[in-house]
Amino acid sequence: MTGNGALWLVVGMGSQLVFSSRFLMQWIYSEWRRESSIPMSFWYASAAGSIGLLAYAIERRDPVFIVGQATGLCVYCRNIQLRRREARADIAEASR
């Protein structure tokens, strides 16, 4: 394996690890709250892992993988945007 191939293997594996860790984060957070909840870390890990996996998919020139990760990334970014909006609204409401 060339240096470039090894680098992309590390990017792919590291991104998959981040992407997969989001389920552990969600489980621990839900147990801590005693209800099913999705923490912001879930969405950040989703986006970060997806970005890395998308880069890996582009490098591998895998159109199925590219479409899947690009679509998911849109969903994760939208959820981050919605949650940030909710947080700003909560802060504004609390300051009234």
Image: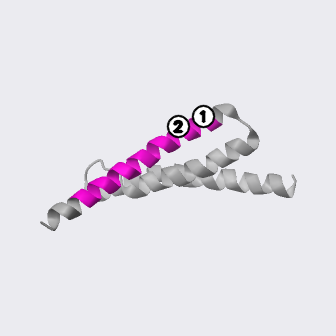
Q: Residue furthest top?
A: 64
Q: Disc number at residue 67? A: 1
| Residue 57: image location, x then y, percent | 68, 42
Residue 30 visible in the shown view: no
Residue 86 included in the magenta stretch of the image: yes
Tell me the kind of residue under disc 2: Thr
Q: Secondary structure at mark 1?
A: helix
Residue sitting at x 23%, y 57%: 89
Q: Residue furthest left?
A: 96
Q: Which residues are magenta?
A: 66-89
| Cα separation between marks 2 and 1 | 6 Å
**47 lies above or below 60:** below
Residue 67 picture quarter: top right
Q: Which residue is mark 2?
A: 71
Residue sitting at x 57%, y 40%: 70
Tell me the kind of residue under disc 1: Val
**95 lies above or below 67:** below
